[in-house]
Amino acid sequence: LGLTADAGLFVLTADAEARLYRADGRDERLAAWPAEPLDGAPDAPQGVYVAAGDGGFVTTAAWGGPMVPGGRVFTAFDGDGSPRWRLLRHDSAWVEEVGADGSAVLFSYGADDPGHAVYVSPAGAPTDLPGDLWAIGAPVAGGHVPVQRGDRVGWFDVARGAFAPVVDRPVVLTRADAHRLVSLHQGVDAPWLVISTPTAVHVIPLLCAGGAADALALAGYREEGWILFLDGATGAFLRADLNTFAIAMFPYHAGDGLTPLSECYRPAADVDAGGRILAAFRDADAGQIHRLDPASGAWTPVGPRFTAIDDLAVEARGDAVLIRAIGHGQSYCPWQEWGDAPADARVPGALGELHLITPDGHDAVVGDASSMTALSDDGRCAAVWDQDKPGTWDVVDLPTGVAAGLAFDRAPTWLR
């Protein structure tokens, strides 16, 4: 991975403790709870939780609950486990977002407070945001928070206490990452795709889209610079380059005899870091993920063929591809009818299967489709539910299948 020995890989929480596991295999207990007694707090928290962002994470040591007066100790760490700040609050609150600069957004509420967002600076100083603002992404450097107010989205400048909408048009959906806020709006004569930072706004009228903004279903988003829609009016994929602002459309058609396998909650598709589209297709007997090369227009199969399933969900993870083959009756998807099972197709069974396809085409089965397998961002490592030891997870190197020799009862929070 090109990481230093001290680099943090993941954090485990158990009861009132959090442990950081490093790249060289060492682990250490994190100081999520102050050594000195706290005024009005118990001797130890009732639970410790963790939220990660781009470059750091925040632990929450909590006591009390929604209906019981309590409190929280929030402690921010950088990605290598060095403490950044600590904040004590005597209310019910949780971490919503963690910024790359060590800032965070909390959501706080109490007996007389229906709830509001709180910005915490990289130095640990809290600032309450107006109650009608909802944070929709991590804060960025300089104290700017992407927020929504009513049907408008924009940036809140904490220092000035001012909200600036990106455009004065109703919003349909949003995505935010460490670099930008991306929003789709009901525009004028065409849907508007808006790509913004606190200092710049770029509006792209989607003239090639065949319908209104709400006819565009989100099919994939990649922080590296891509957003993918399935246009319900044209039946084609609409892809935007978030760095160059270029728009392209691609047919949802992988060849004769194949039809899209996309009759569920969302398109069975995704876009990878290189802008290649991944989508599920089927013939009469089996379904399979295919990947589109935008330059050549060619679709190529990825991973095995499946039969006797209701859906194929696909997700790009670095250069790897995660596929969930969902068995009959295991979701709200319509029942899919299939012909005789081909000899080369997998029959996952009632619980389905979870597959990780490496860049060289290796197929690693990492659980059933319903397992909450926790994957690192690059798709190379996973915490896999151990079928032989109920209630435990194992850390596995997916390309080799080698387990790291760790077993624990809660899924980790990956930092990389």
Image (cartoon, rainbow, N blue to C red):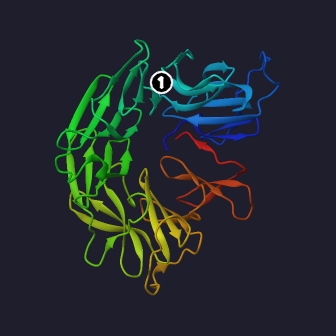
Residue drawn at the location 41% of the way across and 82% of the way down? 285
Q: Residue 275: tell me if it is visible.
A: no
Q: Residue at coordinates 54% horizontally, 25% vertically from top-left?
A: 116
> Which sits in the foreground, 73 or 295?
73
Can you give x and y, in whole percent of width and height, for residue 346 in the image?
A: 50, 77
**Looking at the picture, does residue 226 appear above or below residue 291?**
above
Left or right relative to 375: residue 282: left
| Label 1 Cα neighbours within 10 Å, binned few <14 / some 14-19 / many ≥20 | many
Look at mark 1 in the image and give the residue it sits on: 101
From the viewer's perspective, is 394 left or right of 118?
right
Q: Residue at position x 69%, y 32% from top?
A: 66
> How many dots with numbers?
1
Residue 27 location, quadrant: top right
- Residue 311: give x, y in percent of width and height: 46, 67
| Residue farthest to the right, as pictured | 43
Q: Is residue 175 above or below residue 271?
A: above
Residue 288 spot, x, y in % from top left: 40, 71
In this rendered view, identify the residue nearer to me: 231 or 402.
Answer: 231
Q: Secondary structure at mark 1?
A: loop
Please give left or right for residue 253 compared with residue 388 in the image.
Answer: left
Tell me the amino acid under the disc marked 1. Answer: Asp
* Frontmost residue, 269 versus 263: 263
Residue 144 in the image: above or below residue 415: above
Residue 241 appears in which quarter of the rendering? top left
> Height in image: 68 above or below 189?
above
Q: Is residue 236 visible?
A: yes
**Residue 159 percent coordinates (x, y):** 43, 12
Check the image and name the residue furthest to the front.
112
Q: Residue furthest top?
A: 160
Residue at the image position 35 percent from the left and 60 percent from the top? 278
